[in-house]
Image (spheres, grey):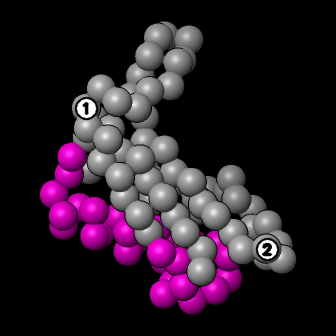
Amino acid sequence: MPYLHLDLPGSYPVEVKRELATRLCKLYADVMETQPWRPNVGIAELGKDNLYHLSPDGLEPITMVMVEFRRGRLAPPNPSGPKSDFALQPRELKP
């Protein structure tokens, strides 16, 4: 089974996390051309001030998403296409 893992820079209501997990499963299924029930989603809330990226303007909080594919699976047809953005940057997760 594919595994989607998110590291979040804060704590969020369970409803927000459940909606995000649902959206990610549907997005994964759409991109990978499979069923939405296949991926498992793990959400780790690291808390405020625990996850950063160094940008030209200094440190900024981020959300990290990792996706594991099983051996033998081809890469997604267009992993950086416009479809991949909508679920990975929801307003509800902005720090």
SS for tag 2?
Answer: loop
Compared with 27, 8 (above or below) is: above
**For residue 76, what is the image quadrant?**
bottom right
Q: Is residue 26 magenta?
A: yes
Q: Which residue is mark 1?
A: 48
Horizontal side, residue 59 vs residue 54: left or right:
left
Quadrant housing residue 14: bottom left
Residue at 35 percent across and 52 percent down: it is 44
Is the residue under label 2 in contact with that under label 1 (CB below 8 Å)? no
Residue 71 makes an appearance in the image: yes
- Quarter of the image with the C terminus in it: top left
Identify the residue at image location x=16%, y=57%. Answer: 13
Amino acid type, callout 2: Arg
Amino acid type for the residue under numbered disc 1: Lys
User: Where, quadrant-wise, is the N terminus in this rendering?
Assistant: bottom right
User: Under tag 1, what secondary structure?
Assistant: loop
Query: Mark 1 or 2, which is nearer the eye?
Result: 2
Can you say whether 58 is above or below 60 in the image? above
Q: What distance separates the C-alpha of mark 1 from that of mark 2?
A: 35 Å
Number of callouts in the render? 2
Q: Is residue 39 above or below residue 6?
A: below
Which is nearer the N-term, disc 1 or disc 2?
A: 1
Q: Position of residue 68 (x, y in %)?
A: 64, 64
> Which residue is tagged 2?
71
Q: Dot 1: few (<14), some (14–19), or many (≥20) neighbours within 10 Å?
A: few
Image x and y of residue 5, in percent? 48, 58
| Residue under the point 35% across and 45% down | 8
Which SS type dominates the magenta stretch? Answer: helix
Give the extent of the magenta segment: 11-40
Taking the view exactly as shown, the residue that stands out farthest to the top is 57
Q: Position of residue 43 (x, y in %)?
A: 37, 58
Q: Residue at x 64, y 86 (%)?
A: 34
